[in-house]
Image (cartoon, helix red, strand yellow):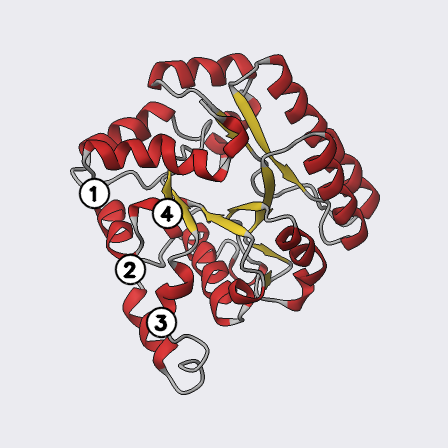
Amino acid sequence: ADQTLTAAKEWSPSRSLEDMDAAGVALSITSITTPGVSFGSDELARRLARECNDYAARLASDHPGRFGNFAILPWPNADASLREIEYSLDTLKADGIGMLTNYGDKWFGDPYFAPIFEELNRRKAVVYTHPTAANCCRNAMAGIPDTAIEYGTDTSRAIVRTVFSGTSQKYPDIRFIFSHAGGTMPFLIERLANLAKTPQYAGQFPKGFLGEAGKFYYDTAQASNPAAMSALRKVVPVSQIVFGTDYPFRTSLDHVKGLKECGIFNAAELRAIERENPMRLLPRRRL
């Protein structure tokens, strides 16, 4: 946790550009990770979200072609979040919206999110997600940070709830990106596929669990290794995998090397992951 805090405090545009240049990364999309901007005060959340989004837009304009951003919302205030969606996407020209995998132990399948998901679906927006620890499971094991196990688990919860609640079918035009190769979802695929075949769900999912989960995008951050990439490659098409780094917590070069050396992808597939798939999601960022 201390290392994570230090890395965040030491982030700067110049260091980020150095990291990108060392790995041959042309464009970085910034986003806010956990704990987000909501700390019990709607007014504080609204102000923090606006400051963060304005800063990210300035960063992009100060370094043309090098930075984009996924805007943060002052959720759970629905009205303020709807205003921030409008401001961020229409005025700031943000590339999408960044959200956490749960808010107050409510995951994406909850009706709680309906007001903003309806608007994001109308806009055909990109929604990038980053895990956080649920209240139920924070600091579950002494000496083991939530980043080690819980973050991957919470990403899986968000994916599973988005599918089995019918959310992905109700809002088919939201383009979800889930971090870290889908967390533990690829490893749990047999259980999830079988759940989708049970009487409770079979009628809802004629194409099975992956008929829905296979439409989402998954990034490579902290997962550019043979085990994670081979599992993800087996459950979703290469077209749904996009490059991600988790910088400043890891370097871009770690991930470029990891993807190249993991032995899972050929040159054309690496080009798709690192360039073509992200450009399909972000068409105005033509490189």
Indicate the amino acid at tag 2. Phe
Identify the image quadrant of residue 275: top left
- Return the residue at label 2: 187
CA–CA distance in space, label 2 to label 4:
17 Å
Picture disc at residue 10: none
Q: Quadrant of the C terminus?
A: top left
C-alpha separation, residue under disc 2 versus residue under disc 3: 16 Å
* Mark 1 neighbour density, 10 Å: few (under 14) some (14–19) many (20 or more): some
User: Which secondary structure lies at badge 1?
Assistant: helix
- Mark whose residue sits in front, 3 or 1: 3
Q: Which residue is mark 4?
A: 240
Measuring 46% from the left and 30% from the top, which residue is drawn there? 3
Labelled disc at residue 208: 3
Left or right: 8 in relation to 233: right
Measured in 3D between alpha carbons, the distance from the residue under mark 3 to the one under mark 1, in whole angstroms, is 26 Å
Dot 4, how many residues are within 10 Å of its Cα: few (below 14), some (14-19), or many (20+)?
A: some
